[in-house]
Amino acid sequence: MLKNLLHRIVSNPSVYDRLQIMVGSKQIRQRLSTHLQQLPPHALVVDLGGGTGINHELLSTVSRYICLDNDPVKLKGFREKYPTDFGLLGNATQVPLQSQSVDLVLCTAVSHHIPNEFLTAFFSEAMRILKPDGRFVFMDAVWNPQRPISRLLWRYDRGSYPRPLETLQGLLEQQGKILHHENFSIYHTYLIAVVAPK
Ligand SMILES: C[S@@+](CC[C@H](N)C(=O)[O-])C[C@H]1O[C@@H](n2cnc3c(N)ncnc32)[C@H](O)[C@@H]1O
């Protein structure tokens, strides 16, 4: 019941954005931004599970940004903030975009929402839509039971599938070529990876 109540409160886009800042989103996005520097202005960026478009501010030089999410409430929050950008209601495990059409696929804090049976499709869809010289920038918190604060946060998280670092890295390696990876801890332990098509 407490979990349901929290979810109702957090699904409000402005509460969600504030909560992200409290749980270290600023530091995480600083790290992410170092991998998003070399995009040409005409690059097409797709943010899978982009929610309210919190990554948009990291991409100020980019003119074509698509925020794909399966939650209409989050997309409404996105559209209110960025009325000239494109919010796409869709499923990240069956992306309604052409193969090899995207310069950068960004996906942050989403894989822990994806059930096991769809996880391979989730990663392979990200790689499918990438141009041959495109990049997939992935970030998520991982399951690290040695951190009590992380265990507590996972208990109340809407995403029910936190996974160990090795599981996520292994899946990324199956689907593409990992050019860079790093892990660090704030409350959770996080993985950031930059992946190119094989
Ligand atoms: C924790 S939020 C992360 C939002 C944003 N990427 C960020 O970093 O703040 C997870 C997002 O993934 C979305 N999501 C979960 N499963 C999805 C799916 N199968 N397809 C598309 N979006 C999904 C949720 O609606 C939610 O907006």
Image: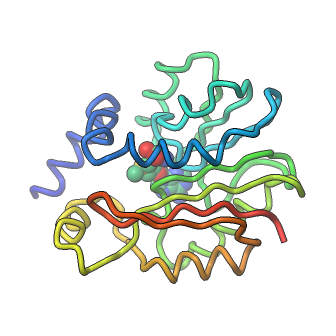
For the point 47% across and 35% down, the residue is 54
- Vertical position of residue 108 compared to residue 160: above or below: above
Please state if 21 lies on the left or on the right of 161 as rendered.
left
Between 183 and 131, the one nearer to me in the picture: 183
Between 78 and 181, the one nearer to me in the picture: 181
Q: Quadrant of the N terminus?
A: bottom left
Between 171 and 195, the one nearer to me in the picture: 195
How far across and how far down the image is residue 7, in percent?
A: 23, 48
For the point 75% across and 72% down, the residue is 176
How far across and how far down the image is residue 42, in percent?
A: 83, 28
Q: How many tags in the picture? A: 0
For the point 54% across and 75% down, the residue is 168
Image quadrant where residue 146 sits: bottom left
How far across and how far down the image is residue 124, in percent?
A: 71, 69
Image quadrant where residue 17 sits: top left
Q: How is the image coloured?
A: rainbow
Image quadrant where residue 123 sits: bottom right
Farthest residue to the left: give it. Answer: 2
Please state if 147 lies on the left or on the right of 125 as rendered.
left
- Vertical position of residue 156 compared to residue 120: above or below: above
Q: Quadrant of the C terminus?
A: bottom right
For the point 73% across and 24% down, the residue is 63
How far across and how far down the image is residue 93, in percent?
A: 62, 62
